[in-house]
Image (cartoon, rainbow, N blue to C red):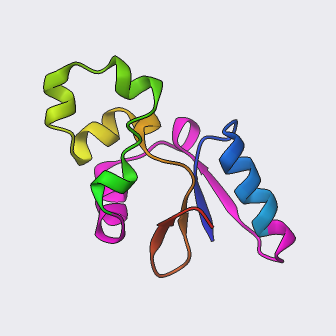
Amino acid sequence: MIIYGIKNCDKVRAAMKQATANGQSPQLHDFRVDGIDADLVSRMLQDIDLNQLLNKRSTTWKQLDEATKAAADAAVLVAHPTLIKRPVVWTGDHFKIGL
């Protein structure tokens, strides 16, 4: 199991703690430390709809210009990984949001 997010995010920390309590050995992939690329976002979007993956309540989203918001796609998520809802979890065969 891989948990994608940001290490100081409360939801990511809770997911790591919950997975460990359930006897799993989760690995954290921190977007800021480990990075993110178009291939990873593309694989996430195969399992999660863009509208579900995109966090429109984030500070980053509110700071984007209207043209970028209107054209939001995988490239915008790669450029601004904090727009991805957290945590995204890879279970070994698919991605999902949360545990």
Question: Residue, x 47% and y 42% (percent of image)?
Answer: 35
Which residue of the protein is positioned furthest toward the bottom in this rendering?
93
Residue 88, given in percent of the width and then of the height, sits at: 52, 58
Question: Residue, x 29% and y 54% (percent of image)?
Answer: 50
Question: Residue, x 46% and y 31% (percent of image)?
Answer: 58
Residue bounds of the magenta highlight? 20-48
Which residue of the protein is positioned furthest toward the front in this rendering?
57
Residue 9, given in percent of the width and then of the height, sits at: 66, 39
46 to the left or right of 98: left
Establish if 46 lies above or below 37.
Answer: below
Quarter of the image holding residue 4?
Answer: bottom right
Establish if 97 lies above or below 5.
Answer: below
Is 61 inside the magenta-drawn segment?
A: no
Quarter of the image holding residue 2?
Answer: bottom right
Residue 81, given in percent of the width and then of the height, sits at: 42, 38
Q: How many numbered dots are placed on residues in this image?
A: 0
Establish if 59 lies above or below 97.
Answer: above
Question: Residue, x 25% and y 48% (percent of image)?
Answer: 74
Q: Quadrant of the C terminus?
A: bottom right
Is 37 inside the magenta-drawn segment?
A: yes
Q: Quadrant of the N terminus?
A: bottom right
Residue 15, given in percent of the width and then of the height, sits at: 71, 58
23 to the left or right of 34: right
